[in-house]
Amino acid sequence: KAGVTQTPRYLIKTRGQQVTLSCSPISGHRSVSWYQQTPGQGLQFLFEYFSETQRNKGNFPGRFSGRQFSNSRSEMNVSTLELGDSALYLCASSPGLRSYNEQFFGPGTRLTVL
Amino acid sequence: AQSVTQPDIHITVSEGASLELRCNYSYGATPCLFWYVQSPGQGLQLLLKYFSGDTLVQGIKGFEAEFKRSQSSFNLRKPSVHWSDAAEYFCAVGGSNQGGKLIFGQGTELSVKP
């Protein structure tokens, strides 16, 4: 099976812009979670989607949003970018209802905000 | 509050020496515990997981971890380290009421001396 794929791998944006990141889970996986990784804050949970519904949400401002499509692919959007949004954004997929059982991570999207 | 602590930010061991990475957690219910490894510029790879049962769990690449409820610990061990084990290691906790949300420690960077 192909692993979790994330596109693009690298992005450079300027403050105030918005950005959309994409994640394709492992075939058959219905849960997709997003994490932000920075040197200062480490790995922080953004949100989780299961069957097109947001099931869980972390402590991030409303500028961070996401969605999941019927084929389980997910996108996250960050509006009005700030310098502090520069990070590695990781997507993880999981088979089903008990998504905590095992999460498979993609390679991440490296976002740089100038 | 739920949290994970990895007391060692950076560890250096000689190739062939044994390794133990420490992880302490704070979690209200029975935790699900994970160790992930991240190589530079890569996503996270699951090494092993603990949900219930035998408190000594075996993982990939020769790693093992022991769950000690009385000490709220889940330390990762390897009897003989290889140069290719140099990477960053993350301990994480999740639970059945957390869906796909994992709480990560700050990570331990492992360097291996030849």
Image (cartoon, coloured by chain):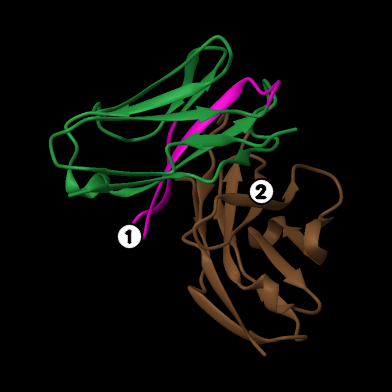
Q: Position of residue B7 (x, y in %)?
A: 51, 71
Say which chain is brown.
Answer: B
Chain A representation colour: green
Magenta range is A27-47
Q: Give the crowd class for mark 1: few <14, some 14-19, many >=20 residues within 10 Å.
A: few
Label 1 SS: loop
Q: Nearer the viewer, mark 2 or mark 1?
A: 1
User: Would residue A77 be found to the left or right of residue A18 on screen?
Assistant: right
Q: Position of residue A100 (x, y in %)?
A: 64, 34
Q: Quadrant of the N terminus of chain A?
A: top right
Towards the viewer: B89 or A23: A23
Q: Residue furthest right?
A: B54
The CA span between labels 2 and 1 is: 23 Å
Q: What residue lies at 50% left-to-right and 13% top-to-bottom?
A: A69
Q: In terms of secondary structure, what is the magenta stretch mainly? A: strand
Label tally: 2
Q: Quadrant of residue B89?
A: bottom right
- Report the chain holding disc 2: B
The residue under label 1 is A40
- Report the chain holding disc 1: A
Q: What residue lies at 68% left-to-right and 65% top-to-bottom?
A: B75
